[in-house]
Image (cartoon, grey):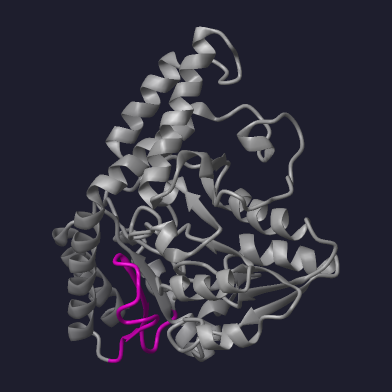
Amino acid sequence: MKQTAISSLNPVYLDNNASTPLSPEVVSAMAVCLRHNFGNPSSAHPYGEAARKAVENARKQVADLINTRPEEIIFTSGGTESNNMAILGTALRFKTGHIISSCIEHPSVMNPLKYLEGLGFKVTYLPVDKYGIVNPDVFKKLIRKNTILITIMHSNNETGSIQQIAEIGKIANSNKIVFHCDAAQSVGKAPVNVKRLNVDLLTIVSHKFYGPKGVGALYIKWGTALKPILYGASHERGLRPGTENVCSIVGLGKAAEIAKKEMRTRVSGMRYLTRIFYDELRKEIPGIKLNGHPTRRLPNTLNLSFPDIQGYVLLERLKNEIAASTGSACHEGKHKPSPVLKAMGLSDEAALSAVRLSLGINTTEAQIRRAVKAIVKAYKNP
């Protein structure tokens, strides 16, 4: 079957928070694995041993990226499974209990929490300020004697705002409460050091930093107990049964190795381009508003509300020029404002006018300037 080609107009890709292209080094590593490394890692013969070594090498590469030990990394099918494993695996060790989260978490955190509420667990959803940030002082006051889990994202996928995870982690640790952090949007594009963050569990997603889809990882601090949510053989410390997806794991490992090596230049490069992008748009479109924290943010993310136009309308005009997204949901032809932006206090109008522009390591200054021209033209000349 012939694959659908991207438009010959070659729209500038500005949706890297949704997914990133595979890096050439990752493609090469996976190609070698696909051609030659077909053994089952659980097999005792040389083919199985080769596959097992490939998995363990990737485990070390991922561990090195977040400053931990390989034995504290479990491979999963992606962020959704990692979040479910962390949340359900912690909560189901208890018959009941209290959980603290925030009101702006990803659905792969929110929905497991709703499931637990149905089982009788109590969940407190912390509010956020106008920048989308949880106040650690408010959080501290909400801890109960039966609080068993705290789960707060590292950075928000829509706004890029980064939470005060280290401070929250200190409070969690001092109260002996398990602390899970969904770092899907942060790992690989901003420094993430689990020791400094004081977390017990941390979610990692491959395709957010130039690795393959369908694979991820969960950091589990040694000594942190989890109840399995899948049952089968004893793979991955008995927590994740099923034959390992060896070649995708190899791809994740290679992506992690590259991210560690390039982290400083990635952050500075994307921050520089994001600043140009925002400054140039502000010059041309008075009244444009940045949503999210002005400094505590991912280096690649801009969430902007454009005056007097809905975000989906603007992107529809730009579909052959740029690829980006809004945080609004469309049901039966009606667009609803992003719950994240509403939680930050934005009006329906401001929230519906928002567009998320997320850069990547392949984004160039020439593309940014081209995108600025296209956005300004589409905005001013319907």
Q: Which residue lies furthest to the left in this view?
A: 366
Q: In this view, does 258 lie to the left or right of 343?
A: left
- Residue drawn at x 27%, y 72% is 375
- Whether residue 295 is in magenta: the answer is yes
* Location of residue 13 (image quadrant): bottom left
Magenta-span inclusion, residue 62: no
Q: Position of residue 178 (x, y in %)?
A: 63, 64
Give the residues drawn in magenta, as a range: 287-310
Give above or below for 311 relative to 307.
Answer: above
- Tell me what residue is drawn at x 42 percent, y 78 percent: 354
Query: Toward the viewer: 232 or 167?
Result: 167
Total of numbered circles in the picture?
0
Residue 38 appears in view: no
Which residue is farthest top?
Answer: 45
> Is 50 rendered above or below residue 235?
above
Q: Is residue 286 left or right of residue 227?
A: left
Residue 16 picture quarter: bottom left
Magenta span main SS: loop
The reply to whether residue 187 is visible in this rendering is yes
- Residue 185 location, x and y as percent? 44, 60
Q: Split into 4 quadrants, where in the image is the C terminus? A: bottom left
163 or 324, which lies in front?
163
Q: Image check: 168 left or right of 359? A: right
Query: Which residue is at 43% across, 59% downward?
Result: 195
Q: Residue at x 53, y 63 (%)?
A: 181
